[in-house]
Image: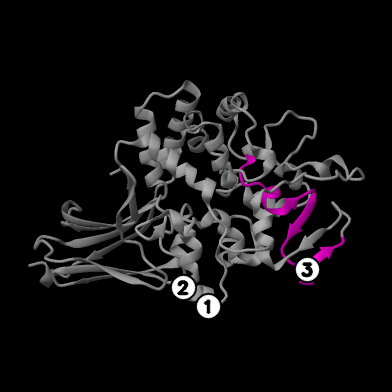
């Protein structure tokens, strides 16, 4: 369990985004150092739509990308659970969080009044984004769009992206809309994701950064085989960014083998198509359970194991355990000495994607909070509870001669 030191825990957890490092030099480092979408000379010959950085504006021509993105965690990155902590964190630390949750300079919070106004606006903000875009309608600041289209694709008014799909062209590619774009192979590399998904080694806990995804990938067979982050999380350039919150995505990456023999039940789980530790971050918890059932379906006895990286803060960060699966690893979970009356065994695997954050939210709610912040944290906790799901379920009947 998390220690009852939630305020410093929340501060340090979110503060990590201030120092999330880009472990490579050159073009990508400058691209993510201080991203500004609209810096420099404004292209006066462009239409209002071309100047607009809102994702709904991009949707007018890039509908497929927008539709996938608006269902993703990237569109929800400016979340109630994040900004509900802002009054306690203060302006500087809050903007540190935005380095990954809303990366553009245009998305920064300019002052405390705007910070508090953002909380009130978030309470009224509907979930999702409307593709039917009215250029003259009142709108929320761009930060409310989270990791938006412009965060990855626009610098100094210019558009950037992967090589042209049909031709593979890189460098400046002419086009009628917004002056064309600049194609780069960097957009197809795992390193492009690293500034937010790889924390620096200087802030490691028990030798491993709290988020160590790029390094885990580099040490796997997938890196050697050229399988990039985008291969799984952006197949065919789709902008859904599916991960631990998506049961179908997770099932594709694991293999389950249940066995019931004599008085022993076992479940082998193999990480077959996950290019980093499962799960890669400290926030999820995966529970493996086996239930010995009688003929009426009643539970006689049960065993449970967790797959997670447990950390806590108490006079410094501590790693309590790390039971995650590495790429290619198989692990056998065994229930020995089944009760004689057991007629069957139920194997199940359940995922709590936001387990760590639930502890943070519960701790914050136990302390005094201003009204808007409290409502946002309550909303975040409710959403986190809704994100839980059952990944795997299988019942195996026991042979009659094995039950006695």
Determine which residue is flagged by label 2. 220
The residues tagged by marks 3 and 2 sit, at their Cα atoms, a distance apart of 29 Å
In-front residue for pair 260/105: 105
| Percent position of residue 155, x then y | 75, 51
Answer whether residue 16 is magenta in the image.
Answer: no
Residue at image x 30%, y 69%? 331
The residue depicted at 46 percent of the width and 72 percent of the height is 219
Residue 170: which disc?
Answer: 3
Q: Is residue 275 visible?
A: no
Q: Position of residue 169 (x, y in %)?
A: 79, 70
- Which quarter of the rendered picture does the N terminus lie within? top left
Binning the other alpha carbons within 10 Å of mark 3 as few (below 14), some (14 to 19) or many (20 upward) gives some
Residue placed furthest toward the bottom: 225
Q: Are marks 1 and 2 in contact (CB under 8 Å)?
A: yes
Q: Is residue 381 left or right of residue 338?
A: right
For the residue labelled by badge 2, is the local secondary structure a helix, a strand or a loop?
Answer: loop
Q: Earlier in the sequence, mark 3 or mark 2?
A: 3
In percent of width and height, residue 143 lies at 64, 38
Residue 255 is left or right of residue 24, and the answer is left
Q: Is residue 316 left or right of residue 115?
A: left
Work out how far the residue at label 1 is from the one at label 2, CA to CA, in angstroms. Answer: 7 Å
Name the quadrant of the C terminus: bottom left
Farthest residue in the right direction? 45
Residue 189: assigned label: none
**Residue 353 location in percent, x, y?**
42, 50
Query: According to the image, label 1 marks what residue?
Result: 224
């Amino acid at each position: 369990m998390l220690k009852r030191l939630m305020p410093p825990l929340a501060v340090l957890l979110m503060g990590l985004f201030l120092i999330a490092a880009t472990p490579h030099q050159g073009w990508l480092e400058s691209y993510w150092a201080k991203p500004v979408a609209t810096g420099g000379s404004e292209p006066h010959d462009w239409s209002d739509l071309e100047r607009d950085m809102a994702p709904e504006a991009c949707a007018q021509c890039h509908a497929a990308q927008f539709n996938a993105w608006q269902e993703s965690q990237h569109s929800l990155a400016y979340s109630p659970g994040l900004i509900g902590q802002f009054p306690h964190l203060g302006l500087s630390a809050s903007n540190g969080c935005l380095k990954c949750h809303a990366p553009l300079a245009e998305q920064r919070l300019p002052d405390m009044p705007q910070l508090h106004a953002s909380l009130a606006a978030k309470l009224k903000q509907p979930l999702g984004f409307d593709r039917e875009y009215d250029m003259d309608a009142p709108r929320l600041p761009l930060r409310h769009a989270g990791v938006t289209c412009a965060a990855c694709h626009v610098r100094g008014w210019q558009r950037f992206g992967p090589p042209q799909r049909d031709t593979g062209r890189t460098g400046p590619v002419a086009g009628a809309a917004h002056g064309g774009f600049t194609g780069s192979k960097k957009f197809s590399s795992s390193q492009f994701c690293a500034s937010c998904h790889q924390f620096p080694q200087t802030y490691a806990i028990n030798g491993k950064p709290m988020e160590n995804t790029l390094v885990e990938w580099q040490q796997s067979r997938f890196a050697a085989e050229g399988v990039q982050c985008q291969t799984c999380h952006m197949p065919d350039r789709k902008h859904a960014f599916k991960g631990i919150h998506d049961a179908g995505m997770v099932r594709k990456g694991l293999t389950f083998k249940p066995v019931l023999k004599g008085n022993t039940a076992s479940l082998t789980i193999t990480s077959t198509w996950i290019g980093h530790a499962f799960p890669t971050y400290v926030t999820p918890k995966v529970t493996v359970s086996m239930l010995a059932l009688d003929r009426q379906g009643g539970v006689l006895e049960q065993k449970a194991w967790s797959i997670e990286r447990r950390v806590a803060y108490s006079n410094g960060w501590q790693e309590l355990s790390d039971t995650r699966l590495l790429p290619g690893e198989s692990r056998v979970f065994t229930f020995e000495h089944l009760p004689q009356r057991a007629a069957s065994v139920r194997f199940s695997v359940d995922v709590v994607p936001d387990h760590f954050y639930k502890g943070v939210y519960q701790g914050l709610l136990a302390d005094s909070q201003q009204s808007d912040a409290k409502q946002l944290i309550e909303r975040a906790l409710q959403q986190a509870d809704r994100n839980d799901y059952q990944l795997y379920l299988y019942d195996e009947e026991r042979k009659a001669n094995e039950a006695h």
